[in-house]
């Protein structure tokens, strides 16, 4: 009865907006109309804020397409789907019309998006603050087995982020610019509506883009928000990143103060009104900027520094040195001269607090360390998985930990189950609901109820059948969108994540070459396998692009060889993004989480795969450690060196890749193949040789010591999959039932309890 009523309501609303019958409307018209309906509906859930409100500042928000997700959260999805189907239209085709917002890069941005969903779902007041990039990171294309970057034009047409009349003046290199606020409604699942606030300049002009994604980096007025992470291999690019960061934090800080004052704050009591989470170091300048603004309003420097420390908290996302941003002070002199005296005063305060020069904000080389400023002038520094936080405390940030032990805490990452289960895998959602009821949608720990069915053959068969259907759907999508044919009867092994040497796609590559030789020698794998990759490489990251090249060339070598391709296929999916992830993850049998132990802070891809019934093949790194604890060692495939072994190797400086290459004939055979005849018939000598040399002479992320263990574990997983499908299904069900801990609802509840205290005064 309810469905029927709502169905009629949707139908009436749609025909009213489109001004004609649903069956006569184009998908674009229907999409626009639904956007309007969602907007109206989400406004109804925007509640006034009492007490403390969160501002989550982040350079990235990898939010994914929004229509279906918003409809699910607002409880309208089924009604809309039925209504469309009644008129011969398909929800899936409608979804195709929506461009995916290009506001993020990888895990860090996706985490921010999951957090916004959980905040709204838990009825917590919390907005995002970021930038409105016109062309995002880039759109990835493969030509001649090489990555090519083109602008990802996703704006234009009807958009979720609405232009507002609010602007804030931001001074960049001594000149004033107007930052305009755009607002995107974030719906909660049966919860409140919050907002993602995105800043932009009106003067951006994409005609400055030349070939690929290159452009005049100095023309700030026209280029400021064109791209996320503009190439920083030259100075103009690095300055541009500072320009972007300051636009975001200055406009954001002004907005925060304005809102809090409107709500009655005297600013002396700002911490009763606002909590600010600094997501990695990109927004760190919000600290001196807030101090600057507070001083302008008549507050003393010392008090301003105290207020800011009480309001702000910092999340560290990585222990890779490259990501702990530091800038030459003269960059800041150029772009944000107004902040420099403030940062110098903060540095002086730190030097009063401690003799330990290693924690200074400005070092002896006049380099400004953003993370140091964050730790000294926020009340909380958190890592993103238990192991990562321990490494921060005990090695990377040990000097800071000894200064402020009470400030360090762990918040293991999570993912929103609304997108990564309800939205991307409705069939599994339905099966789970039929077994344990609907409570798991808001209380993920309820998934443990599935443990009652691990010996129930009928259920296990359903689980296996569902996976098979999802593999078929991925195969069809691949064929339809990229003209790639894969065999859904084969085992799907997926490694999808940013391309980085620490994530070790090159280890997977060496395994696949090894298998190629084994098959050639008549040693077939226990099941036919399809190795599926998805990854973008940073445009200036040469070796990462060489790894993509090698995988694409290998894919061709195997494709040309019917003897091998019957047993093994290598597929690299173009332009990996949230839309692709939603298709790939439900179809995965084995999830590859093979980073060098100690280097992956948490990972969230690992959680999505687990939740969708894949088993994990991984190192004891990041949240893999906690996944292994949750499911038990029989239900995960762990291999490789431990993080302490790796850390010891680095500190001794005694790793020599060449020794491994010379001693181990399998390793040598696989590496030599990179520049052999077969690969050169599809690949480019320069790229393949560079990769080969890197592996033999450097291998900074210690691929070779883990090679043999990886081969053994992976072959074990393939054999288990092939030889005992019911047991495999049972173990996937155990993984699903133990995934509840990795819900971002749990993560957000912890942040709120320990750091934010939202809604309290
Ligand atoms: C989850 C996700 C990531 C993060 O994956 P990791 O394996 O944790 O690095 C990156 N990109 C997209 C599109 C994602 O959905």
Image (cartoon, rainbow, N blue to C red):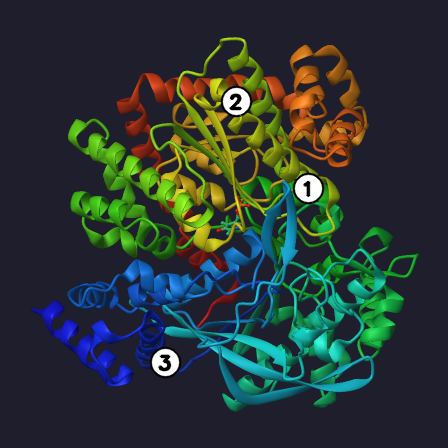
Secondary structure under tag 1 reads: helix
Q: Is residue 539 left or right of residue 187?
A: right
Q: Does residue 588 appear in this view? A: yes
Q: Is residue 518 left or right of residue 81?
A: right
Q: Earlier in the sequence, mark 1 or mark 3?
A: 3
Q: Is residue 257 above or below residue 537?
A: below
Asked which quadrant contains residue 294, the reply is bottom right
Q: Which mark is residue 544?
A: 1
Q: Which mark is residue 561?
A: 2
Name the residue nearer the viewer: 742 or 682. 682
Q: Which mark is residue 37?
A: none
Q: Is residue 164 above or below residue 565?
A: below
Distance from disc 1 to disc 3, alpha carbons, whole Å, reads: 46 Å
Query: Which numbered disc, 3 or 2, marks the residue closer to the eye?
Result: 2
The extreme top residue here reads 522
Distance from disc 3 to disc 2, alpha carbons, whole Å, reads: 62 Å
Question: Mark 1 Cα within 10 Å, few/some/many (few <14, many 20+)?
Answer: many
Secondary structure under tag 2 reads: loop
Distance from disc 1 to disc 2, alpha carbons, whole Å, reads: 26 Å
Measuring from the top left, give residue 577's x and y in whole percent.
50, 53
Q: Earlier in the sequence, mark 3 or mark 2?
A: 3
Q: Which mark is residue 47?
A: 3
Q: Earlier in the sequence, mark 1 or mark 2?
A: 1
Question: Mark 2 Cα within 10 Å, few/some/many (few <14, many 20+)?
Answer: few
Q: Is residue 679 left or right of residue 450?
A: right
Name the residue nearer the viewer: 240 or 320. 240
Q: Residue at x 38, y 31 (%)?
A: 487
């Amino acid at each position: 009865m309810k469905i029927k009523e709502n169905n009629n309501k949707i139908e009436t609303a749609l025909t009213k907006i489109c001004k004609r019958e649903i069956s006569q409307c184009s998908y674009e018209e229907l999409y626009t109309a639904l956007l309007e309906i969602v907007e109206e509906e989400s406004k109804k859930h925007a509640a006034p804020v009492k007490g403390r409100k969160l501002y989550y500042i982040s350079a990235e928000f990898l939010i994914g397409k929004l229509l279906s997700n918003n409809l699910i959260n607002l409880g309208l999805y089924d009604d809309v789907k039925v209504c469309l189907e009644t008129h011969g239209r398909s929800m899936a085709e409608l979804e195709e019309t929506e461009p995916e917002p290009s506001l993020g890069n990888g895990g860090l941005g996706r985490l921010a998006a999951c957090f916004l969903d959980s905040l709204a779902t838990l009825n917590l007041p919390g907005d995002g603050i970021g930038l409105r990039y016109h062309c995002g990171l880039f759109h990835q294309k493969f030509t001649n087995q090489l990555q090519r970057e083109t602008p990802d034009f996703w704006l234009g047409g009807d958009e979720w982020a609405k232009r507002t009349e609010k602007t804030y003046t931001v001074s960049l290199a001594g000149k004033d610019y107007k930052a305009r606020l755009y607002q995107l409604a974030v719906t909660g699942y049966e919860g409140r509506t919050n907002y993602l606030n995105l800043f932009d300049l009106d003067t951006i002009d994409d005609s400055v883009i030349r070939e690929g994604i290159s452009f005049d980096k100095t023309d700030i007025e026209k280029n400021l928000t064109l791209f996320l992470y503009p190439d920083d291999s030259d100075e103009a690019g690095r300055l541009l990143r500072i320009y972007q960061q300051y636009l975001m934090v200055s406009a954001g800080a002004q907005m925060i103060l304005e809102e809090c004052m409107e709500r009655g704050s005297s600013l002396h009591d700002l911490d009763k009104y606002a909590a600010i989470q600094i997501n990695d170091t990109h927004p760190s300048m919000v600290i001196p900027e807030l101090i600057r603004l507070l001083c302008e309003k008549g507050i003393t420097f010392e008090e301003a520094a105290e207020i800011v420390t009480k309001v702000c908290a910092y999340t560290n996302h990585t222990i890779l040195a490259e990501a702990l941003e530091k800038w030459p002070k003269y960059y800041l002199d150029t772009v944000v001269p107004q902040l420099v005296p403030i940062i110098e005063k903060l540095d002086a305060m730190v030097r009063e607090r401690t003799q330990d020069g290693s924690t200074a904000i400005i070092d002896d080389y006049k380099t400004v360390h953003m993370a140091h400023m964050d730790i000294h002038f926020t009340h909380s520094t958190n890592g993103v998985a238990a192991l990562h936080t321990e490494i921060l405390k005990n090695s990377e940030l040990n000097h800071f930990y000894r200064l402020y032990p009470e400030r360090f805490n762990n918040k293991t990452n999570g993912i929103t189950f609304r997108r990564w289960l309800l939205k991307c895998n409705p069939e599994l959602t339905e099966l789970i609901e039929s077994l344990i009821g609907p409570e798991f949608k808001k209380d993920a720990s309820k998934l443990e109820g599935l443990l009652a069915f691990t010996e129930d053959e009928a259920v296990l068969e359903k689980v296996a059948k569902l996976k098979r259907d999802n593999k078929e759907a991925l195969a069809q999508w691949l064929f339809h969108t990229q003209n790639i044919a894969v065999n859904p009867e084969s085992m799907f092994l997926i490694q999808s994540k940013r391309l980085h040497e620490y994530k070790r796609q090159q280890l997977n590559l060496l395994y696949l070459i090894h298998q190629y030789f084994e098959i050639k020698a008549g040693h077939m794998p226990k099941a036919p396998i399809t190795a599926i990759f998805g990854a973008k490489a940073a445009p200036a990251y040469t070796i990462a692009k060489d790894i993509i090249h090698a995988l694409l060339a290998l894919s061709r070598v195997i494709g040309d060889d019917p003897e091998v391709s019957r047993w093994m296929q290598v597929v690299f999916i173009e332009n990996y993004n949230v839309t692709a992830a939603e298709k790939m993850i439900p179809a995965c049998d084995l999830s590859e989480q093979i980073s060098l132990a100690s280097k992956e802070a948490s990972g969230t891809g690992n959680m999505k795969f687990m939740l969708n019934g894949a088993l994990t093949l991984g190192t004891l790194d990041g949240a893999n450690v906690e996944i292994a604890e949750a499911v038990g060692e029989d239900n995960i495939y762990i291999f490789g060196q431990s993080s302490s072994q790796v850390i010891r190797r680095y500190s001794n400086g005694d790793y020599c890749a060449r020794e491994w290459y010379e001693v181990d004939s399998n390793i040598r055979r696989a590496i030599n193949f990179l520049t052999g005849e077969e690969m050169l018939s599809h690949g480019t000598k320069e790229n393949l040789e560079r990769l080969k040399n890197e592996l033999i002479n450097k291998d900074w992320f210690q691929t070779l010591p883990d090679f043999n263990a990886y081969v053994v574990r992976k072959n074990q997983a393939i054999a288990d999959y092939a030889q005992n499908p019911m047991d495999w299904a049972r173990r996937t069900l155990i993984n699903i039932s133990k995934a509840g801990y990795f819900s971002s609802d749990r993560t957000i509840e912890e942040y709120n309890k320990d750091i934010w205290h939202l809604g309290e005064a």
